[in-house]
Amino acid sequence: MGDHPAGYGKVFHDARFNWKYSTEPEPELNGRRIYWPRGKVLGGSSAINAMVWVRGHPADYAEWGAAAPGWGWEDVVPVFRRIERWTGGACAHRGGDGPLSVTDMGGAMHPLTRAYVRAAEQAGIPTNTDYNGAAMEGAGFYQISTAGGRRASTAQAYLRAARKLPNLRIVCGAMATRIVMEGRCATGIDYVQRGRAQTARAGEVILCGGAINSPQLLMLSGIGPAAHLRDHGIEVVQDAPHVGRNLMDHLGSDHLFRTRVPSLNQVLRPWWGKALAGMQYVAAQRGPLAMSLNQGGGFIRLAGGDGPPDTQLYFSPLSYSSAPTGKRPLMSPDPFPAVRLGFNPAKPTSRGSVTLRSRDPLAAPVMRGGYLATEHDRRLMIAGTREVRRIASMPALKDVIETELDPGPDCVTDDEILDFARAEAWTVFHQCGTCRMGQDAAASVVGPDLRVHGVAGLRVADASIFPTIPTGNTNAPAVMVGERAFDLITQG
């Protein structure tokens, strides 16, 4: 797989590194199954994601703190600073010497990405040079988790040093199948490695399987909705009705614009362009192969009032609309010059779920995104499309855009825009919330200390514990949860 950023496209459909999950047919998306790639390597999905680093808005953590004291904005900001090795240097808002490198890519942006930021400013959206700083609102260039042009996954940032510790053993090629329980106390993990069943014993078990596999493993171990467990012949250890519920995700919609000037397509499409980009990367870890797919974006509010952002923007000077089904060949983009300008509602109110397909731990669970189930989400999909077009109509982009290819100028009315979203919108890969955190055991799965309600010796520490979905990409909040888990565990 490698750790260069462009490797994201290589592993997007590679079963060696990716669980390649898919949802059940989504009722509000024309019955489409939505592809959910998830990391199957050390570092989890941080090893295969697009590397965009977004902490979230203070209002997100006001919601978290209300659900679980100790998780408010003032609690988590020091943790984010502790994580970061920000290339902009340490300051009141950013960390400069943490284990995980976060890079300011502003100096390397494609001219069309710069045109996008100018167009946003012309549309009344202020330019924000650090959305992870004092304020989040505005448009700008995305920061990415890279170190010296190489991907900074959690494995790279944490495990490379930690693997030397005498009390750490890393077991690869292993599949956890069940939490070992003695009554209502977790004492270890059963797992399969190279076809052999084995057991690891522990004084405390911490699940970090993510929003899909952590609830799955809990249910396989008898912790979950009692009726659902009995349906699959699983003995109920703890009736926990919210395990696998409350799934949240960001649903994105992309617009494809053909440009009058060359885009990144003309760099990465021809053989000589690939060779030049490859040499540039090998020689200096710079150029398009050292960057994320989405170079620009931002956070705006489309609803009335003065609240936090409700919409995230994305801009890429690259397109691959001609890619075959099941492929995402970033090194073979469209043969014509084009850019993608997209968005997603930042705080969707639709909810999905993860349930068991069978008691077989090797069987993928049943996944439902539940997308566009609420009027709030449908309204924002329509408003987001109109906002993308408004930005594209500003002089800085209008001068370089030839035509809108997708959805195209014939897609005008609210119904037509919503039909396009139902046919084409897809996940931004931010599944979370399926083991949500809260004080009330009747309405959550883990407490503020990340311990599973009603079970001793068991915690969950990953994106599944998010009480509400953050405004922005979920990798940074997930890493923060891991750091907070360290604090909670070492404090006893």
Image: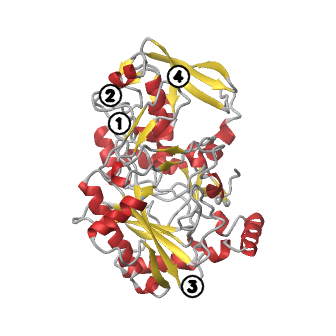
Q: Which mark is residue 241?
A: 2
Tell me how far mark 4 sits from mark 3, CA to CA: 55 Å
Looking at the rendered structure, the secondary structure element under dot 3 is loop
Query: Does residue 430 appear to the left or right of 6 in the view shown?
Result: left
Please, what is the three-letter code of the amino acid marked with disc 3?
Val
Q: Residue furthest left?
A: 305
Mark earlier in primary sequence (1, 4): 4
Q: Are the residues tagged 2 and 4 within 8 Å (C-beta)?
A: no
Q: Disc 3 marks which residue?
A: 261
Inter-mark Cα distance, 1 to 2 = 8 Å
Which label's residue is closer to the chain start, 3 or 1? 1
Q: Name the kind of residue labelled 1 in the image.
A: Arg
Q: Earlier in the sequence, mark 4 or mark 3?
A: 4
Q: Quadrant of residue 270?
A: bottom right
Is residue 301 at all visible to an observer of this figure?
no
Picture coordinates of residue 152, whole percent (x, y):
62, 52
CB under 8 Å between discs 1 and 2: yes
C-alpha separation, residue under disc 2 versus residue under disc 4: 19 Å
